[in-house]
Amino acid sequence: MASVNTLCKSVLNVKNTVIKNCNLCAPCSSSDNGKNINRVIYMNDNFFVMPTLGGFLKGDLLIIPKRHVFSIASLPKDFRSDFLKVLSDTKYILNLTYKVSD
């Protein structure tokens, strides 16, 4: 398992900085002390996936781009196919976890 510092550096946005008051950067903020980084269940070069806090259903997850964007619709074009891959991989993980078939 990678160290908390290594995971935090990977989760940070493209400029490798935490944006103040961004709830999604919070797991890597100095005030968080890395306690939420352990919630990350999947990560690649452009995205990370973590469970929501207080989700209504088991398996509620967030797919979060490492680059700050206004919405998924405003992702750079080169990120879109990667997003679909993360979505597919995350669906697979959920199906295995909750023993659901397509």
Image: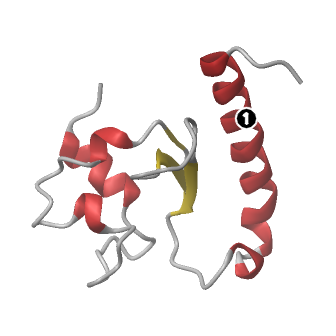
Q: Identify the amino acid type marked 1.
A: Lys
Q: Is residue 15 left or right of residue 78?
A: left
| Front position in the image: 43 or 24 | 24
Can you give x and y, in whole percent of width and height, for residue 46 in the image?
57, 57
* Image quarter of residue 64: bottom right
Residue most toward the right? 102
Quadrant housing the N terminus? top left
Residue indicated by mark 1: 91
| Front position in the image: 62 or 28 | 62
Q: How many numbered circles are shown? A: 1
Can you give x and y, in whole percent of width and height, for residue 35 in the image?
18, 47
Vertical placement of residue 80 versus 61, above or below: below
* Colour pattern of the rendering: secondary structure
Can you give x and y, in whole percent of width and height, for residue 7 in the image?
31, 46
Q: Is residue 87 left or right of residue 19?
A: right
- Binning the other alpha carbons within 10 Å of mark 1 as few (below 14), some (14 to 19) or many (20 upward) gives some
Q: Residue at x 46, y 36 (%)?
A: 41
Q: Is residue 25 left or right of residue 14?
A: left
**The residue tagged with tag 1: helix, strand or loop?**
helix
Vertical placement of residue 77 versus 85, above or below: below
Can you give x and y, in whole percent of width and height, for residue 82 in the image?
73, 53
Q: Is residue 46 left or right of residue 33?
A: right
Vertical placement of residue 58 versus 80, above or below: above
| Front position in the image: 43 or 32 | 32
Q: Residue at x 72, y 55 (%)?
A: 83
